[in-house]
Image: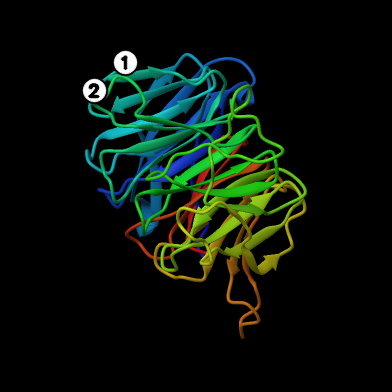
Amino acid sequence: MNPPAVLQTPGFAHYSLAWSPFFNSRLALASSANFGLVGNGRLHIVSLVPGPGGLPTLKLDKFFESQDGLYDLAWSEAHENHVVTASGDGSIRLWDVTLDNLAIGVWQEHTKEVFSIDWSNIQKDTFVSSSWDGTVKIWKPDRPRSILTLQAHQSCVYQALFSPHQPELISTCSTDGTLKIFDLRSPAYATGPSTNTFTNPLSAAVLTVPASASEVLTLDWNKYRPLVLASGSVDRMVKVWDCRMVKMGDSQVGGTCECSLPGHEYAVRKLQWSPHQADLLATASYDMTCRIWNTVPMGPQPPLRYIHDAHTEFVVGCAWSLYDEGLLATCSWDSRLNVLRP
């Protein structure tokens, strides 16, 4: 196996990365000075280009400065040069990578850090954000304010993602140990003995999955199997959930755990299903590794396929190339972006 292509961004620890849906060799990288605790952030635009001997190499095309750390980003599904970023100061910014310096759009509604952002690949004029303030907000880039707010959890929402199959469904994960699925067609408030819609309203999820006794840091929808999700949590576990029993319009608690994938030595920070294979999953962890899993329950292949251990700090991001099957990018607090073919 060839060594990974590496790009270093000295002084800026990475938080997230994403491949462009329009260009097969372009990536965006979100980073923060001082590990995101204090100081500014940077959005890096990176290209994968042929290098010496024909091996690919990474080239920094340009970067944009932000006043606070950047925690996540997403490429627009409608405009090839637009990227939206999530910031530690509660702001969301839209950037045009062909321009210099300033963002072309700024939204400031979240009251705490914005920790995730995701652009719908079906409803291509819509993106979603989640925050440590417990809310999930739906946005359109041409609107000055959010178009919908869900009070998704009573505590930090680490990630919110649109379903790649049904544009009205959003999944979330939280400090409270749950995964939730929300149907945007029927936003309503939860009712019951433990809820108070007056002092502390909570939006009603169509399904709540008690995924972990610890914080759930990350999730992803399977690209081939609707209503199948993966979760990663502080308890070091990766789990695959079959949520096909969900009935739209009802509020249920459930979810069937298809398989559990132990092996990481510390919290699982980010995971992503392959866009090319239904049972291939990449996971990034605070144990400084990225691991590749086969998720077929009791299948002929062992679950753990590969361990990428070239990083020297927390691995916080992993993303499969949308065009080049088997090509994986990882990013870390060691300020190194790696691109490899495991």
Observer-nearest of 166 and 92: 166
Residue at image coords 61%, 64%: 240
Residue at image coords 34%, 45%: 120
Quarter of the image for residue 105 reads: top left
* Label pair 2/1, CB-CB below 8 angstroms: yes
Observer-nearest of 70 and 248: 248
Q: Which residue is mark 2?
A: 99
Asked if residue 269 can be seen in this view, the reply is no
Observer-nearest of 102 and 60: 102
Asked if residue 135 can be seen in this view, the reply is yes
Left or right, 253 with respect to 56, comes to right
Label 2: state its secondary structure: loop
Label 1: state its secondary structure: loop
Q: Position of residue 329 (x, y in %)?
A: 48, 51
Quarter of the image for residue 99 reads: top left
Disc 2 from disc 1: Cα separation: 8 Å
Left or right, 38 with respect to 267, comes to left
Q: Which mark is residue 334?
A: none
Quarter of the image for residue 307 reads: bottom right
Q: Position of residue 52 (x, y in %)?
A: 37, 52
Q: Position of residue 94 (x, y in %)?
A: 33, 26
Residue type of the residue flagged with mark 1 = Leu
Q: Which mark is residue 102?
A: 1
